[in-house]
Image: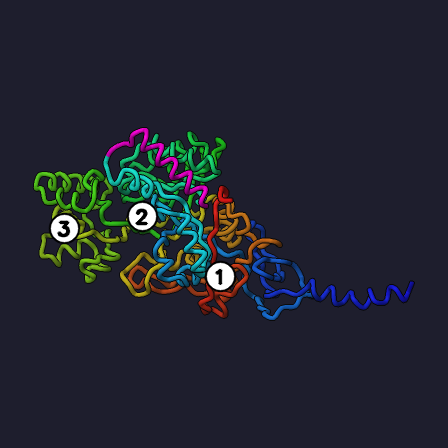
Amino acid sequence: MIKKLLPLIFLIPGILAAQNKADILILNGKVIDGTGNSWYYGDIAVKEGKIIAIGKLTSYTAPKVIDAKKLIVAPGFIDVHGHIESGIFDQPTADNYIYDGVTTVVTGNCGGSAGNLKRFFYRIDSLHPSINVASLIGHNTVREQVMKRDNRLPTLAEQRTMDSLVEQAMKEGAVGLSTGLIYIPGAFANTAEVVSLAKAAGRYNGIYASHIRNEENNAVEAINEAIQVGKEANVPVQISHFKIGGKGNWGKSPITLGLVEQARKEGWDVTIDQYPYTASSTNLGVRLPEWALAGGQDSIKARLRNPAIRAQIKKEMLQQLYRYKFKNYSYAVVANYSSDSSYNGKSITAINKLMGRKSKASYEAETIMDMVEKGGAQMVYHSMHEEDVKYIMKYPFCMAGADAGVPVPGKGMPHPRGYGTNARILGRYVREAKVISLEEAIRRMTSLAAQKFQLKDRGLLKEGMAADIVIFDEATVSDKATFEQPHQYSVGFQYILVNGKLVVEEGKHTKTRSGVALYGPARK
């Protein structure tokens, strides 16, 4: 009997060694696992893109060992509000996101997505960017395919066609439906149209994410509409970049957020996302009334060149301005104006003066119309208050979303949120202002986002989960991008893994591209 056992005894060390080999071993880190629980000291073993073990891993070996002593080890951050449809193919290393700790981006927000998601996902998986990419299907995209930019409600046949397009997108891997109800042509839709589309997404277990119809004076009505869509379609709701804009509305975030809290108390799955800045960013055209933007650019030009129509447009622009309690358009700053790049970084007030016009809001409205006639511009609007930003950030069901694309370094004056959203939360609002705890901030950026958008194997440090991991210094992590100098990467992230591959090593992007397309629940 002893002779028979001896070969087995000699084999046992070899068996254990085979079981305990990893590709990457992370040692001595302060592990924050994404659940919201307190940190603990531990090691993590990664193999073939997955987390295979967590704990005190004294028996594990790996060709790559990372000493994470004095560093935080957390799940890779999930940005739930991106617009990377084109930029990711031009800049596949996605440096702005990677240096900010982001390993996954949900794109297709605000009603605008790739028109053919099957092809989009195929391109992502062929390209292998440095980040993972999930996508919503955009209402504006679908409506324009069926109805162009017409200012009218759909016929029954058109509604059915749009519903079927949403269903097809869900089957192709969308995680839900998005709307941008301040943008053309989505602004021309009524609630019933949106409900029908949300039902189509809901039939395939999708969510409804909305850039609501108004984020200023009529924010209460707009939030209620988003909640109504969720109730009638029986789908989870995500309210995008939750904010309250306009001087006259500062301090009203307890009212607007109270609507979300009440809906949740009643049993409706309503959550929000936020970028941690007091300025928003969108196009210049939103300063004009919606009806003036119907049709294509030729239609817009024709209206602006008709004296009577132009006068009516200006009248409504100024009415909007005064409702927001602004005296002029100095709060509106150009991020990118293709017709004249010298305008980039300047306010409408400053540009108006450069044009030799009087310093009055009525003349500034003329300047805006002239710029829209030439193709418009991407803008930054300084219209929010810091106390509202903090109040909203304290809400436990608020996620992080940069509302950004993948910028070309040095081009234009984009909103700094595209470079620094997550690092700003961790540095300014966690470490310095102590608005929320570190563990809570990471929960919002990871497991909460993964749960909402049904990214099943992301958002937690847990055995069997995808090895999307960030390792950073909590004492130094911070955003560097400013409104004056936006093209600056965040600092403090020492190592980042995407699907088990090192994308950042010792603070430097390795140019590794290990990201993949992440599909919604209906794709088989």
Residue at 36% in and 52% down: 83
Residue 316: give x, y in percent of width and height.
17, 39
Callout 3 touching callout 2 (CB < 8 Å): no
Residue named by callout 3: 370
Nearer mark to the viewer, of 3 and 1: 1
Residue named by callout 2: 384
Residue 155 belongs to magenta span: yes
Dot 3 falls on a residue whose secondary structure is helix
Alpha-carbon neighbours of circle 3 within 10 Å: few (<14), some, or many (≥20)?
A: some
Q: Nearer the viewer, residue 198 or 435?
A: 198
Alpha-carbon neighbours of circle 2 within 10 Å: few (<14), some, or many (≥20)?
A: many
Q: Is residue 128 shown to the viewer in this render? A: yes
Q: Nearer the viewer, residue 514 or 489?
A: 514
Nearer mark to the viewer, of 1 and 2: 1
Q: Determine which quarter of the picture holds residue 416.
A: bottom left
- Left or right: 65, with 167 as reference point: right
Q: Which mark is residue 514?
A: 1
At label 1, which amino acid type do we have?
Ser
Q: Nearer the viewer, residue 493 or 508?
A: 508
Magenta residues? 152-173
Q: Is residue 17 above or below residue 467?
A: below
Q: CA distance from mark 3 to mark 2?
A: 26 Å
Residue 495 belongs to magenta span: no
Return the residue found at the far right: 1
Residue 417: give x, y in percent of width and height.
36, 56
Q: Is residue 322 above or below residue 329?
A: above
Q: CA distance from mark 1 to mark 2?
A: 38 Å
| Majority secondary structure of magenta residues | helix
Dot 1 falls on a residue whose secondary structure is loop
Q: Determine which quarter of the picture holds residue 32.
A: bottom right
Residue at 40% in and 63% down: 95
